[in-house]
Image (cartoon, helix red, strand yellow):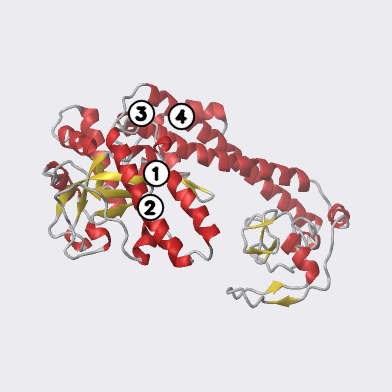
Amino acid sequence: MGQNMMREMNGEDLFVLLQRYRSIDGVSIPLSGIGSWSELHCIGSNNIQSLYRYVLTSWEVCKERYEEALGDCCLLLGDTPQDLARRAELYEFPEEIVFGKEPQDNHSVIEPIDEASVQRRKGTTTFNVCGWCVYANRGYTIHHCNLNPVCRLLPSENGVKSGKKRFDTPCELLKCSSTELRQVGSALLRMVQKLEGEVAFLQEVMRRLRTLEACQRPKPFLPAYRDGSCFLPGEEIVFFLPPESGACVESCWYTGIVGARTHPVIVEFLSGRTMWERSSWREGRHVICSMNQPYLLPLSSLRYLQQVASFKDMHDRMFYQIWIRSVVISQGKWGLGALDQLICEAVPVEGSGEIESIMPSTNIPDALHDLRLSRLPDSLEELDEWYASMKSCVSADKYPEISPRGVEVLQLESAVMDTAYEMVKREIR
């Protein structure tokens, strides 16, 4: 389908195609509860921007695949078996491959272990043996050898045997007759045409999203579209922990503030509140959440949802329904009615508003946790390198729009890291 035909499509037909193409070569386009093109008119400019970025990523992947397939098609279309045989002569055909398994490897796939195979580079056995062929992909690779490759020149629809091969499999294309080669070329041509249509479609979606973005105001981010800018250090947020989490005494919305690293979000409790039933690391004064979790909300977003739930404005009410629907889709454990009641009746438990000093580490496990280390480093050099990278995360320069309270949070976390660093350094020595 060409670009001109795409421009003539109405929005709802385009949305049906978007649902069909929402996953391209492993790159997903989350629709986050959006059920039609008309609903895109009410989700807000910031959510449109996030959706645009997902579509752009898919377009880039699709365009790369299209250009790759076009080159492959030009290479094979019109070739004869004799032409391929001459191409193969330009590359190496390894005959004495030693099979085995390196002792330190924990996988069970047979691999080449002779010196020539270990040193051989990708592209050296093209049109001869699969393992080092430039057209082999999607397999487990070791020593530049693709151990179980799939040939991208053999689309699954053609009559030639395709699918995963072993790395020492001789090139299937060299066994093809003239008729079979024409089938391969035709299959590649159909793939090029299909990818060309997908590229044109995604371009048109991006063009229309830009138009929609220009005529909308910002609204709270839908959970699937959040990024690091949604949770800045020091920002006041609310989060809900259901009873089954085992983390809180009773089911309730709580107030907290965002810590230094925003993915995942680290929430420090405001003073005067302890949620945990029993003592835990840092006396239960923090919890780590994924930024896409719907039960984690900026306080302003919760207030907005509570306001628009009773509004008569069609677009605001539709946005509220989309938000609720996106949570039900992502979580699967809350019904629409229950979640609607949960939002409308939410009264966050607030602290005093003051940030208490974060308790520093008193033992090595806690110190490693404070530095986000899963094990004790092998050397001081390794520790210093990691410590420097962690300290950069608590630098106020990383957050241009940070508030004074955010700076205070970063300073507290920096002090905790300094204490943990000294403890771990003494342990290594």
| Gap in angstroms between the C-alphas marked 3 and 4 | 23 Å
Q: Amino acid at mark 3?
A: Ser
Q: Residue at horizontal 36%, vertical 41%? A: 226
Q: Amino acid at mark 2?
A: Met
Q: Residues within 10 Å of mark 3 (few under 14, many from 20)?
A: many
Q: Which residue is mark 3?
A: 45
Tag 3 secondary structure: helix
* Front one among 241 and 18: 241
The numbered mark at residue 417 is 2
Q: Which residue is mark 1?
A: 394
Q: Specify which label sits upstream in the sequence, 2 or 1.
A: 1
Answer yes or no: is residue 219 visible.
yes
Answer yes or no: is residue 35 visible.
no
Q: Specify which label sits upstream in the sequence, 3 or 4.
A: 4
Q: Which residue is mark 4?
A: 9
Q: Specify which label sits upstream in the sequence, 2 or 4.
A: 4
**Nearest to viewer (mark 3 / mark 1):** 1
**Nearest to viewer (mark 2 / mark 4):** 2
Q: Is residue 312 left or right of residue 323?
A: left
